């Protein structure tokens, strides 16, 4: 590959922003695009906070990836002299009846050298008396993990990218000609919609994408394109991705803690996750927001562009009942803020990291599935290696895994 390839990255969220930055740091010329800006309210990387954790159950690549991401978050925090990772620790509550996720995580945490403690029920109750541990027999505590500032870190990555010489444009990529109408280039070349929409013939040779249409009417030409478009990935590539990436509505709630009561602040309480019954998780209150809690159960289908971001009253009632049970002092706590985000997920919850099957210079990156944000720095590093050194992604991330499934 030429010493200074021009690479266009479409999407400035956790995956796209970090990918653009790593590509730039490895010597590429990079243009980064985003329709509404890094960490915007429609993006899967929007919102104030995300969980940073290494516990992922058995037989998966994400604990190792989280270990690498932890090192990279620390590296860039030192470089930028800013804090994004708040190391409150992460507590996993495990019941004795259904704790395969937690028990299966221990070996992976140890192999990845992520620090953790296995705590008994008695130890949990003594350490965090503000939590009602009924039904919980033991727990995993990750002291070096916690929560990340989401929106702020997305913006910081783009700022660093621009400061280092990258070009950022707040524009949307349009679906025109991203996928040929037939896998055979000659057929696709003859199937143009109109003379005005005709793409130059040299752009169609060797099944390579020549340029992309942008929302301001201009076109962008690059050697390689990385599409990290979150919930829009399937809309831009209906044939290669389509419904393999789907968006679901996820309601998030913030409750006000009692005045002068610091037991539910991030200095006294870790990020927590409870797999008993439905999987719920939360982030302790800070000087920015209240006590955050959400149900990880996948919600209804959601349109990330036009969907109204109003929480469900039914979900709110369920969350209130849960808070009153697990955190008794917060019973009847006022709801001070809500947010609707979306998971952009794949059927198996694994990421998509692969070349487009019909265009050798298009990379598809997405399917964060509600757990992708923390991995952003490691994903960016991985993508720079794959793209610039023409490597192949791991089978678990390839599109081919969905064949005959």
Image (cartoon, helix red, strand yellow):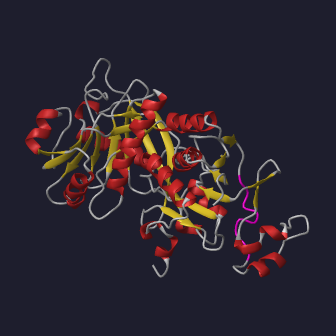
| Residue 226 visible at all | yes
The residue range painted magenta reads 173-181
Residue furthest left as drawn: 122
Q: Is residue 359 magenta?
A: no
Q: Which corner quadrant of the image does residue 88 belong to?
A: top left
Residue 385 is situated, as x and y percent measured from the top left of the image, at: 51, 56
Q: Can you give x and y, in whole percent of width and height, for residue 391 in the image? A: 51, 65
From the viewer's perspective, tell me whether residue 222 is left or right of residue 289: right
**Who's the residue at 72% across and 79% down the image?**
182
Q: Nearer the viewer, residue 391 or 186?
A: 391
70 relative position to 218: left or right: left
Q: Main secondary structure of the magenta part?
A: loop
Q: Decide: is 356 above or below 339.
A: below
Front position in the image: 166 or 159: 166
Quadrant assignment for the N terminus: bottom right
The residue positioned 48% from the left and 66% from the top of the image is 393
Please say if 283 is above or below 349.
Answer: above
Q: Residue furthest right?
A: 195
Q: Residue lying farthest front?
A: 3
Q: Quadrant of the C terminus?
A: bottom left
- The residue under the point 47% across, 36% down is 48
78 displayed left or right of 228: left
Q: Is residue 178 magenta?
A: yes
Q: How many marks?
A: 0
**Residue 377, horizontal then vertical, whole percent:** 46, 46
172 with respect to 70 (left or right): right
x and y, in percent, of residue 178 in the image: 71, 65
Can residue 148 be spotted in the picture? Answer: no
Q: Residue at x 33, y 62 (%)?
A: 60
């Amino acid at each position: 590959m030429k010493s200074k390839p021009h690479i266009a990255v479409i999407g400035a969220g956790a995956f796209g922003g970090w990918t653009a930055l790593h590509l730039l740091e490895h010597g590429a010329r990079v243009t980064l695009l985003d329709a509404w800006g890094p960490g915007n309210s429609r993006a899967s990387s929007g919102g104030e906070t995300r969980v940073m954790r290494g516990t992922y159950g058995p037989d998966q690549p994400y604990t190792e990836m989280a270990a690498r991401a932890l090192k990279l978050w620390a590296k860039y925090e030192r470089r930028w002299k800013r804090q994004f990772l708040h190391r409150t620790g992460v507590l996993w509550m495990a019941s004795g009846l259904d704790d395969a996720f937690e028990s299966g995580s221990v070996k992976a945490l140890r192999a990845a050298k992520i620090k953790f403690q296995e705590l008994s029920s008695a130890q949990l109750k003594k350490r965090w008396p503000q939590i009602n541990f009924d039904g919980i027999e033991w727990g995993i505590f990750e002291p070096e993990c916690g929560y990340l500032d989401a929106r702020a870190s997305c913006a910081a990555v783009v700022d660093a990218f621009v400061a280092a010489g990258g070009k950022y444009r707040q524009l949307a990529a349009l679906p025109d000609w991203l996928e040929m109408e037939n896998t055979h280039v000659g057929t696709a070349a003859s199937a143009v919609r109109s003379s005005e929409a005709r793409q130059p013939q040299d752009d169609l040779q060797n099944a390579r994408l020549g340029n992309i249409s942008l929302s301001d009417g201009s076109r962008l030409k690059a050697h390689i394109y990385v599409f990290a478009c979150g919930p829009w990935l399937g809309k831009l590539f209906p044939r290669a991705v389509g419904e393999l990436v789907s968006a679901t509505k996820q309601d998030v709630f913030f409750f006000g803690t009692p005045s002068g009561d610091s037991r539910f602040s991030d200095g006294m309480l870790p990020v927590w996750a409870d797999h008993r019954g439905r999987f719920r998780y939360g982030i302790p209150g800070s000087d920015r927001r209240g006590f955050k809690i959400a149900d990880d159960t996948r919600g209804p289908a959601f349109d990330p562009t036009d969907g109204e971001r109003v929480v469900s009253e039914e979900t709110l009632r369920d969350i209130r009942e849960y808070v009153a049970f697990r955190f008794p002092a917060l019973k009847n706590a006022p709801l001070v803020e809500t947010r609707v985000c979306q998971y952009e997920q794949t059927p198996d919850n694994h990421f998509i990291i692969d070349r487009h099957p019909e265009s050798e210079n298009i990379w598809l990156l997405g399917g964060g599935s509600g757990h992708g944000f923390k991995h952003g720095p490691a994903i960016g590093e991985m993508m720079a290696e794959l793209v610039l050194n023409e490597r192949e992604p791991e089978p678990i991330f390839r599109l081919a895994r969905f064949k005959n499934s």
